[in-house]
């Protein structure tokens, strides 16, 4: 019994330390401490504070914590440099670990809000996103780091809507485009296409515009702040993408699916990418789907919930679009296309 409890304590302690290590990494990412440490070789906390515009006492304590969690090494007293683990949190590194730290902090924030709101049942809705003073600028990059590789490795070549739209040329609209990473990736790969991205959060659109400028795509890409519930584009689209945004507007699904169909040109497709809430309840226990159950609790705070693929298919059929379902990431996500007849 005693041995069992000791084992349990060790297991929980390791998990708690894991959460702490993500918190320390988060501070290093959002205040660019890792980035400046990478530029210099070995530096004092005072130098780091000056470079980043942060408070010296806070930076000194962060250095202690980052040293404790092996993000920093200390070759001489009070002089710090990045370890290989610290390097893994730099945003110019392919396969970097930034999204884990940002997601972890977002989860802690949402858990605190859910704990309080559970007492009254209030769901404050999307306005809660404005509480994320330090998280919001990293929300788009977090999604980009998490899902960019999936788009490239599992979706583009498998979902025929992309090669079809490439053959036709024309316009792609991305509704709830976040920082625009998806549209930039598609437009970058298909030189005949133009793109329009729309999102409700100004910070996301600012990031999307800057990234499109950096990548030389502004002649074919435009981004604007707007509302999916009321969006209108004069020219019909060849492809309308909604990545992890449909569940945000599901409360008015009839209206949304009618708007989607009416904005498609004949032969055009909507391409919906969503987390796949499992039909078999026990699948929530699959290790890489556990986070889905936590995120669905967070979504409740925003007034949303995750969807079964079948629910989306039913709405596509109801507006006369022909559905096709693609299981992604071992079934954790789903891409569903709905094609308008020619
Ligand atoms: C989970 S994020 C996904 C962002 C992006 N599609 C991606 O894959 O990175 C959902 C996005 O939908 C946007 N959104 C939610 N409701 C919206 C609405 N009514 N109008 C416009 N954008 C909305 C949010 O601002 C947020 O950027």
Image (cartoon, rainbow, N blue to C red):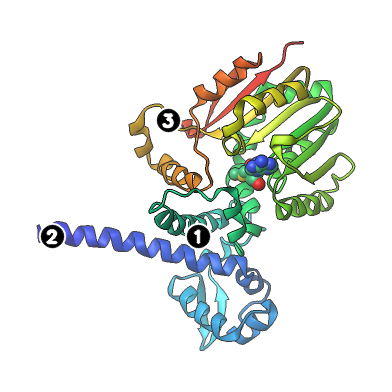
> At 38% across and 37% down in the image, what residue appears?
284
Please tell me which residue lies in front, 57 or 14.
57
Q: Where is residue 236 in the image (x, y as percent from the top left)?
A: 82, 24
Q: Could you give the CA–CA distance between mark 2 and mark 3, rounded to whole angstroms?
A: 36 Å
Q: Position of residue 61 (x, y in %)?
A: 50, 81
Would the CB of label 1 be found within 8 Å of ligand 1? no
Give neighbour class at mark 1: few <14, some 14-19, many 20+ (Cα, 10 Å). Answer: many
The reply, left or right, for residue 103 in relation to residue 231 is left
> Is 244 placed above or below 50 here?
above
Compare marks 1 and 2 and give the one earlier in the sequence: 2
- Ligand 1 image-quadrant field: top right
Q: Could you give the CA–CA distance between mark 1 and mark 3, rounded to whole angstroms?
A: 25 Å
Q: Position of residue 102 (x, y in %)?
A: 55, 58
Please tell me which residue lies in front, 227 or 294.
227
Any part of residue 290 in sight: yes
Give neighbour class at mark 2: few <14, some 14-19, many 20+ (Cα, 10 Å). Answer: few
Task: Say which residue label 1 marks.
Answer: 105
Residue situated furthest right in the rendering: 219
- Name the quadrant containing residue 189: top right
Q: Could you give the CA–CA distance between mark 1 and mark 2, rounded to whole angstroms?
A: 33 Å
Task: Say which residue label 2 marks.
Answer: 3
Q: What element carries label 2?
A: helix
Q: What element carries label 1?
A: helix
> Is 170 placed above or below 189 here?
above
Q: Dots 1 and 2: beta carbons under 8 Å?
A: no
> At 62% across and 53% down in the image, what residue appears?
139
Q: Nearer the viewer, mark 1 or mark 2?
A: 1
Give neighbour class at mark 3: few <14, some 14-19, many 20+ (Cα, 10 Å). Answer: some
Task: Say which residue label 3 marks.
Answer: 278
Q: Is mark 3 on a helix, strand or loop?
A: loop
């Amino acid at each position: 019994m005693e041995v069992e409890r000791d084992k349990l304590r060790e297991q929980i302690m390791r998990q708690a330390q894991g959460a702490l290590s993500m918190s320390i990494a988060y501070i290093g990412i959002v205040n660019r401490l890792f980035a400046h440490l990478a530029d210099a070789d070995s530096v004092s906390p005072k130098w780091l504070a000056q470079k980043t515009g942060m408070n010296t006492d806070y930076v000194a304590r962060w250095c202690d914590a980052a040293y404790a969690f092996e993000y920093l090494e200390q070759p001489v007293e009070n002089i710090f440099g990045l370890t290989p683990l610290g390097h893994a949190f730099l945003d110019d590194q392919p396969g970097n670990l930034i999204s884990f730290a940002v997601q972890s902090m977002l989860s802690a924030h949402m858990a605190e809000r859910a704990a309080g709101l559970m007492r009254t049942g209030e769901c404050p809705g999307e306005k809660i996103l404005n509480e994320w003073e330090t998280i919001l600028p990293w929300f788009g990059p977090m999604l980009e780091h998490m899902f960019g590789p999936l788009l490239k490795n599992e979706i583009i070549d498998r979902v025929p809507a992309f090669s079809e739209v490439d053959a036709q040329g024309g316009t792609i609209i991305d509704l709830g485009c976040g920082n625009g990473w998806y549209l930039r990736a598609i437009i970058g790969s298909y030189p005949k296409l133009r793109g329009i991205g729309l999102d409700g959060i100004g910070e996301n659109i600012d990031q999307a515009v800057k990234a499109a400028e950096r990548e030389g795509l502004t002649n074919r890409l435009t981004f604007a702040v707007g509302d999916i519930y009321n969006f209108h584009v004069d020219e019909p689209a060849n492809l309308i993408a909604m990545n992890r945004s449909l569940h945000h507007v599901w409360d008015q699904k009839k209206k949304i699916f009618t708007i989607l169909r009416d904005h498609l040109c004949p032969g055009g497709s909507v391409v919906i990418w969503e987390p796949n809430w499992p039909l078999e309840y026990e699948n929530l226990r699959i290790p890489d789907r556990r986070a889905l159950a936590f995120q669905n609790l967070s979504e409740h705070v925003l007034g949303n919930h995750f969807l079964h693929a079948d629910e989306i298919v039913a709405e596509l059929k109801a507006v006369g679009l022909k559905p096709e379902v693609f299981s992604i990431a071992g079934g954790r996500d789903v891409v569903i296309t709905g094609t308008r007849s020619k």
